[in-house]
Amino acid sequence: MKVTFPHMGHLWLILKTALEGIGLEVVVPPPCTRRTLELGVRHAPESACLPLKVNLGNFLEAKELGADTIVMAGGVGPCRIGYYAQVQREILRDIGCDYEMVVFEPPDVHFSEVWDKVKYLNRRPWQEGVRGVILAWQKACAIDLLEQELQRLRPREVKPGQADAVFQRALRDLDAAGSRGDIKRIVKRVKGEMAKIPRYTDRQVVRLGIVGEIYTVLEPLVNLHIERRLGALGVEVVRGLFISRWINDNLFKGLLPLPGHNPEKTAPPYLNHFVGGHGWESVGDTVTFAREGCDGVIQLAPLTCMPEIVAHSVMASVQEAKGIPIMTIYLDEQTGESGLQTRLEAFIDMLLWQKRRQAGKVYNGRGRNPCQETMPGCLRGQ
Amino acid sequence: MNNKMWRLGVPRALFYYYYGPWWEIFFETLGIEVIVSPPTYREIMDLGVSLAVAEACLPVKAYYGHAAWLASRVDALLVPRLVSVERKSYICPKLMGLPDMLRATLKPCPQIIDTTVNLARRPEEGLAAAVQGMARAIGVRGHRVELAKAAAEARYRSWTCERWGDTKGLETGNTDQAGERRYALPVGVIGHGYLLYDRYLGMDIPGKVAALGGQVILPENIDPQEVEKACRQLPKRLYWTLGRKIIGTALYLMEQEKVAGLIHLTAFGCGPDSLVGDLAERYARRRGKPFLLLTLDEHTGEAGLNTRLEAFMDMLYRRRSA
């Protein structure tokens, strides 16, 4: 049995560790590229949401590498992800691509449904399997820790791209790490390397929250590396969605002491009910970010995403009440890089201008323009 | 608030086409003046399109239009938060957030009665809580509520029976419609009720099919038990109430020799339909049943739609006579 799974940001590294931990042969699908997207778009229903299309592309590319079993997550509504597996199975059948699918979802009748699937997949004694899963969890935490450091560093580094290079190396090392000690050593080393990267001390940095649907937030192919783009524009990105927190919220039911989402406390009165997917969290996180003093929020969603359309519809009232500018970006296979870049630049430009106006530093048209001086190079047109 | 004569606005869109009579009779029995917005027309649609976010689907935009039309004419709007109307099923995330979406958009916004209707876990208790919640929102308690509920349910039952009996095409055949230009072909027109029954929004597709000589079979014309039975063919229980209705109808009609073809009417951006419709189309293709997908949005031109319908009906006739 050669197992594969869909990509979502750095999830592959964690899933690979966990699945190898229970003794399976794992085929990691090739990293998402335009080809993945094209393959998926060719066979998927036209108005299905983007993750379904990209995942389908992943499966087709993994097939070329010899995978024969898919492990993926499902759900029981109301978001579409709960029916992905069934639709994808029919599509794969129609194009003659033979796969076995093991779908993990909340049990319909009894918990034993989930347990049976785990037993079916497990190839090793239980202690070893559990050890592998714990190792995967530790890797998830390490990645998220380093990524937060990366988000802080990106807008401040002198030479754009340095921090990203260090982070990519760290991912490769973490992939190879086989024990808790290895992970600790790697984290320590990478933190040291990141601390040594030369950075601006006087640059004015905009703090921007990213909220939205988890796949578009975490997968750089579909959001066109939005965090890297924002970093280069002098923006420190914060977000509430991380893989480790998602695992904690969904699999461990929030047992571990990680910062979770509490949309039932933060989202009302703007949105008073769960709406599937991450719609409620998007609104709740936006309120949280506004309270924490972020300068703006960007909401990301795949086109036609139902929960995020609800969130988008109420964002106007959040923006009005909290005074925080919010921009919603819908992503699909047609999204172009320059269009996105233009929108981001305009939005950041506006945020910078507002920040200075609040600080009383607005250019009156005479003398030296204080806005021009501290602006990142790319906005000055260099 | 009891002594005041309330004017309660009910938008004629979305789930009005499923539960409208229930709501009307319930509130009228409780002594409330119910005002239903007029059938969709151009101005209402334009109003909705200008208010809603661009990515929302056509029926939701129409709902915004109806709510905005009512906003200045009523004391309160009835926008129940329809989470689930049956066990372990949902409707659509957009209906779960509709009251909040309207509050964020309508300025000034009248009071909104947004009772949560959630029958997903415990249907009986959920329904009772929803009814009590609606009555409490207008300041009525006690056994009057039970009476109103009974009246509403009686009306609702007779109304669904009327709709069910509208066209029992499959059993009776078309012998009584002799003298027509062509003999009537049974054609299944599937889709959400708020598209099929809204003549402006849905471009009166059932009427057009009938005018082209088709005998229209709508999801509401089929025995719900048959629909549920057909749904068991699916690999996994579908958790959208309307999605199950659509695909169940499609699967049932596909197996009927008499039915010449299927027309699926959907709105651009409808989440459940993007998957359910695709599955229905795949199953139809495997069984060799003609299937036409019509996607509507606010830019859809009527002429293009007519051409496609005519071509499809011609093709069905040719298949039949061949």
Image (spheres, helix red, strand yellow):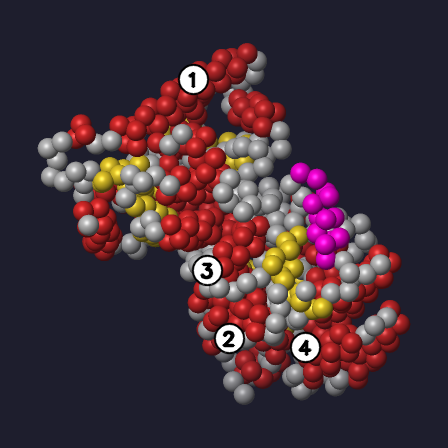
For residue B150, say whether it is visible.
yes
Q: Which residue is mark 1?
A: B154
Q: Is residue B17 magenta?
A: no
**Quarter of the figure that contains the C terminus of chain A:** bottom right
Q: Which residue is mark 2?
A: A35
Using the numbered discs, state the Cα–Cα distance from disc 2 to disc 4 in whole angstroms.
28 Å
**Residue span colored magenta:** A109-121
Q: Chain of mark 3?
A: A
For residue A332, say whether it is visible.
no
Sequence-wise, the earlier of marks 3 and 2 is 2
Circles 4 and 3: CB atoms closer than 8 Å: no
Q: Residues within 10 Å of mark 4 (few under 14, many from 20)?
A: many
At label 4, the amino acid type is Arg
Using the numbered discs, state the Cα–Cα distance from disc 4 to disc 3 in whole angstroms.
45 Å
Q: Which residue is mark 4?
A: A154
Q: Give the left or right position of residue B261, taking residue A344 as reference.
A: left
Residue at 37% x, 53% y: name it: B285
